[in-house]
Amino acid sequence: MKKYRVEYSSNNSGGGWWLEDKDWHSLEKAGWKVAWHKNKKDSFSPGERFLGALATEASIEIKAEDARQAMGQAIRHFEEVTKEDASEEGCNCCGPPHGFIVERSGCKKGEDKEWQHTSGEGVCDFLYETVPGSYREAIELLNTPRATRKISQGTRKRPAPSRSARGRAGVQKRR
């Protein structure tokens, strides 16, 4: 098992924060390290809150076999604690309200950090073993009788670093 740090970042999507004060306190109680705004020394907005939010970031240490597994565990834990849907798309101009970054902790100089980022519907790549490659493919699957359903893109091991205009992680086939 390797140790990973998963960071959560909240985005003021649609003109408001998606997490309330109680959510930040719940995350802290559940083991997440919340970066309280009042404790930030380099903030251009001094005080207890940033645009009304007590915090906009939190992180948790996860032990897992790989970065994909660590990200999935952290996202499930986040959803369980906050009751939020981490795959929300948010508004068209601001983007997804929830973002996650996973990075291997304790790497020696020169080692691969296994860094990955996800937000919006790309979160599904870390929550499910099989994910359709596009929104259209998902609709086709929903409208196909169960016995003949097949995901043409195969399963994805992890999202590729490039993202389309819809905010999706790129398709990467599992080999």
Image (spheres, helix red, strand yellow):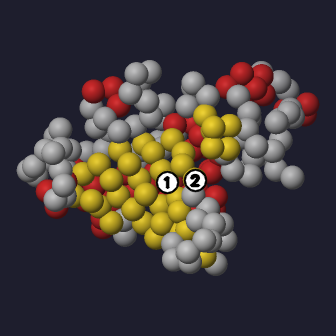
Q: Is residue 34 left or right of residue 118?
A: left
Camera sees residue 64: no
The image shows residue 81, relative to residue 147, as above or below, that is below
Q: What x and y, as percent, mark residue 106? A: 51, 77
Secondary structure at numbered mark 1:
strand
Q: Which residue: 69% across, 50% down?
A: 158
Question: For the image shown, how many numbered marks are present on the structure?
Answer: 2
Check disc 1 and report the residue beneath it: 101
Q: What x and y, as percent, mark residue 116? A: 57, 53
Q: What x and y, as percent, mark residue 117? A: 54, 49
Q: Are marks 1 and 2 in contact (CB under 8 Å)?
A: yes
Q: What x and y, as percent, mark residue 47? A: 8, 50
Type of amino acid under label 2: Gln
User: Which one is earlier in the sequence, the residue at label 1 or at label 2?
Assistant: 1
Q: Is residue 24 left or right of residue 104?
A: left
Distance between mark 1 and mark 2 Cα atoms: 6 Å
